[in-house]
Image (cartoon, grey):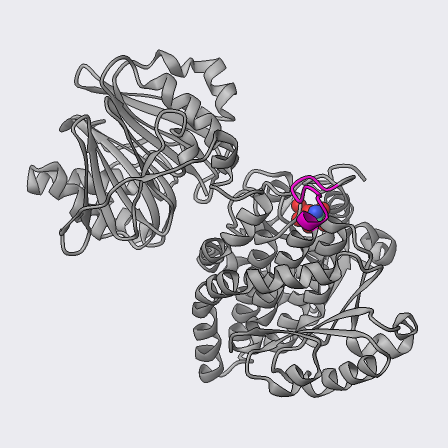
Amino acid sequence: MCRIFAGIIKEGDIAPILRIGLKRLEYGGYDSAGIATIYEGKIHVKKDKGKIDEIHQKLNLDELKGNIGIAHTRWATHGAPSKINAHPHLDCNGNIAIVHNGIIENFLELKQELEQLNHKFVSKTDTEVIAHLIEEYYKVFKNFKEAFIEAIKRLQGSYAISVISTYEPDKIFLAKNGAPLLLGKGKDFNFASSDAIAFIDKTKECIPLEDNEIAIISLEGYEIYKLGSGTKVNRKPIFLNWNLEQASKEGYDHYMLKEIMEQETSMRWSLNAQKIYLELISDYMDKADKVFLVGAGTSYHSCVVGSYYYSKLATVTTIPVIASEFIENYGSSIDINTTILFVSQSGETADVLNAVDFARKRACTILAICNVIGSTLTRVARAYVLQQSGPEIGVAATKTYTSQLIIHLLLALNLAKKRGKISQYEMDEIKEALNEIPFLAGKILREKSKEIKEVAKRIINKNHVFFLARGLNYGTALEGRLKLLEIAYIPSTAYPAGESKHGPISLIEEGVPIIFIAPKDETRKQIIGNMMEMKTRGAEIITLAEEDDEEIKSLSNIFIGMPKMNSIITPILYILPLQLLAYYSSVLKGLDPDKPRNLAKSVTVL
Ligand code: AGP
């Protein structure tokens, strides 16, 4: 969730270049930042909490001397935003400096091992462990490249790492796995960055690193090696014909599309949510006789899906409530025995914070799922878990929604275990399904985009679009509808399919498009009945269903086949085509999906 930038130049000081590059990377994380350079054989560091401009104002980052350096802007995951937790981090003697984007899952065991070897840690971050690990291996190998490789081999999790050292003062050591890292090649300089925007004004020659690779850059050029075998890799630069604006979207036309397409990665990060906090939250929920799930907009929709997870898996009764209605609806019935799980990606939504404030005054237990560490919600909650989506710039919530669903599912699994409501076999099945999520997301996003663009052409001029589903995917219908109406301004309605005959069916006439979310689960038979009801009234039947479901295909005017999957994860994956549908509908109508009218990314007013 952070961003890193590193470079070596032939002439002059690197710090101003690193600061300007860091500023462009700031959308990727902005709670703290720092730069380290090597000058006259020593490492010099300037870092602090806050945004880059504030830190520069305070510390004058450009003052740092030296032609080689590393830089970092942080989106905190381990350790709150603070000067001490800001990157770069150093080893015990200040001979090694590191910046890192990603999550080291085994950092606690590594830290304990190193503390037993008398390493002294100053921060709460997972990253600092890597600096001490390299230091320890350097004592053994007396060769920095070997020490670096051995240390990287010990890491589990995702990382994009950049390291400088007084032992090799003219080289930058890099490692990549599960987080982006690109080299920028030049005549009198070489760079490495989380994305090309940091150096694209200096060079358009870019060499992307792949997972499980390390690289070394110097003024002489770059070398890439496979981490496992040590085999040298010959990779030619690619030419990026992007300008600065395009680069910040990594080549996508809009942040919304970039964020939809990066869900394979963001889902992996959310699946690695910190177990200690999932445990803490599910402990509180386990003690409650009922739990309110409170959010606004998309976050509320995640609560609707979550309520099915908690009930189906853990037999825990939860009540999803729209934040702005919570006080009116339940204000008189909550007290010290009430537990409320608030969900807000920004942690700053006024409707949510207003409900939190009201509930705190009644001594309720306040829990939270949030995306922004240090936000108001994380500061007032008794316990919170970070959904770890990474920053979301587009006004429409996309990757933060699927992250929230994953967190709800992980919490529901924890609760089911605690209450003995799930067998080992069921647990293994669901764990297998969880492991499949990122791969399936990538497959759907790669393979369905073209098809969805065609569907968008069919609906952009319709007066009204319906989204119908049953069970777990009722929340998917709600979210698909919100995306389409808020980004493409197409009036839409979402209902539990069983509710259609209690009123909404009166709106159905020839050609009205109805999008059915109809995976192969226990609701399938009934939803087929609903499809036939609508078909006989002339509706245009658009279905999202399992790719080999011939019966539903035969009923559909448009059939979008989805890969086979455990039905428990269908809400997390069936929303992806609907996110794309909203995006392409908006673009086809000549709108800007990143800046929908009347909307803000975080609604901080009541
Ligand atoms: C999502 O597409 C909307 N822009 C909006 O409904 C959003 O989900 C809502 O404002 C809640 O935001 P939060 O998660 O930051 O609290």
Tell me which secondary structure the magenta stretch mostly adopts: loop
Residue drawn where x is 22% and y is 52% of the image: 154
Magenta stretch in the rendered image: 586-596
Vertical relation: 445 (above or below) 415: above
Q: Quadrant of the C terminus?
A: top right
* Residue 588 painted magenta: yes
Vertical relation: 249 (above or below) 33: below
* Residue 436 painted magenta: no
Residue 516 visible in this rendered orientation of the protein: yes
Residue drawn where x is 46% and y is 17% of the image: 56
Residue drawn where x is 45% and y is 73% of the image: 431
**Quadrant in which residue 44 is drawn:** top left
- Residue 302 at x, y percent in the picture: 66, 60
- Residue 82 at x, y percent in the picture: 46, 31
Relative to 81, 357 lies left or right: right
Vertical relation: 514 (above or below) 362: below
Vertical relation: 6 (above or below) 453: above
Residue 295 visible in this rendered orientation of the protein: no
- Residue 349 at x, y percent in the picture: 71, 42
Residue drawn where x is 46% and y is 79% of the image: 429
- Residue 564 at x, y percent in the picture: 51, 78
